[in-house]
Amino acid sequence: MINETQEQLPLAGRVALVAGATRGAGRAIAVQLGTAGATVYVTGRTTRVKVSEVGRSTETIEETAELVTAAGGTGIAVPTDHLEPDQVRALVDRIDREQDGRLDVLVNDVWGGEHLIGGSFGKKTWDIALADGLRMLELGVKTHLITSHAALPLLTRRPGGLVVEVTDGTTAYNGTHYRENLFYDLAKNAPIRMAFGLAKELADTGGTAVSVSPGWLRSEQMLAHFGVTEDNWRDATKKLPDFGISESPVYVGRAVAALAADPERARWNGQSLDSGQLARAYGFTDADGSRPDSWGFMLAKEADPDVRVEDYR
């Protein structure tokens, strides 16, 4: 019976913190960790009574927590601004108290900087509003550092903890491609390096740190941008055929849940990973049963403009 339960709910008894779980990849990661049986603390700035600067009131951390619980885990919403060290320390202290000093998984997914990008890709650094650029670095880098600084003393009390730095892009792609906005480029490369450094620091505790990138993510904001929903997202390929390689947030959620449940995950320590790569390694699929490889497709298309999306799903 125990073995059967462990197989069905491999993360039963485990405690996770998903920082930045209001929507998109963070929400999906939290839900998939819940599906595997974990207790998941979900944080963010948008609640049912307060909206963050992103300006989307339709997604809240309370809803994410409810989805985690409905999936089979235990979702706990804690409003947190991860730029405020006191709030983050209070969050970690709460986890410590409520979970008997246990934290097994830390997912750093805080971002919320899309509204700062509009029209800035391809511009020179000095032509981008400095305040917007620095805010991107605060949201995408400083938040991760504050959260790790506060949470890792708790996570390292037990051997084998997992840290996942969620970003946009992999070493294979970002290492040879400029992301067309220096601030954005720095914000999305920093988590890759953070995971590399934390892997060294966690090694003596048996811990693992990795960076994980979704591919072309069909987040709520991306769907809204194309004027489609998850039910009819393929309609957007009429305007942009390459959108056919996109993936739902479920895909990266399953990637992180698979990592968290893998007793041999230390083999990935320090590496830059993506959802398609992990799908091939662990055998899971996206919500529609496909297995998209967004980053593989983008690299292949540079060599062969006629490459087909269908060959990478």
Image (cartoon, grey):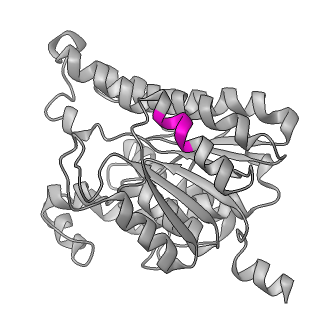
Left or right? Give the position of 227 relative to 23: left
Tell me residue 307's x, y (percent): 37, 57
Q: Along the line of sight, which residue is nearer the eye, 75 or 243?
A: 75
Can residue 6 be seen from the camera position used here? yes
Left or right? Give the position of 282 relative to 128: right
Q: Magenta region, mostly helix, strand or loop?
A: helix
Q: Residue at x 49, y 30 (%)?
A: 86
Q: Residue at x 77, y 40 (%)?
A: 156
* Residue 89 covered by magenta stretch: yes
Which quadrant of the view contains residue 185?
top left
Tell me residue 64's x, y (percent): 40, 64
Q: Residue at x 64, y 73 (%)?
A: 37
Tell me residue 138's x, y (percent): 37, 25
Q: Residue at x 32, y 60 (%)?
A: 218
Farthest-out residue, front: 97
Which quadrant of the view contains residue 147?
top right
Left or right? Give the position of 136 relative to 84: left
Total marks drawn?
0
Q: Quadrant of the N terminus?
A: bottom right
Q: Which residues make up the magenta segment?
A: 87-91
Left or right? Give the position of 154 relative to 74: right
Can residue 312 be seen from the camera position used here? no
Q: Along the line of sight, which residue is nearer the eye, 266 or 291?
A: 266
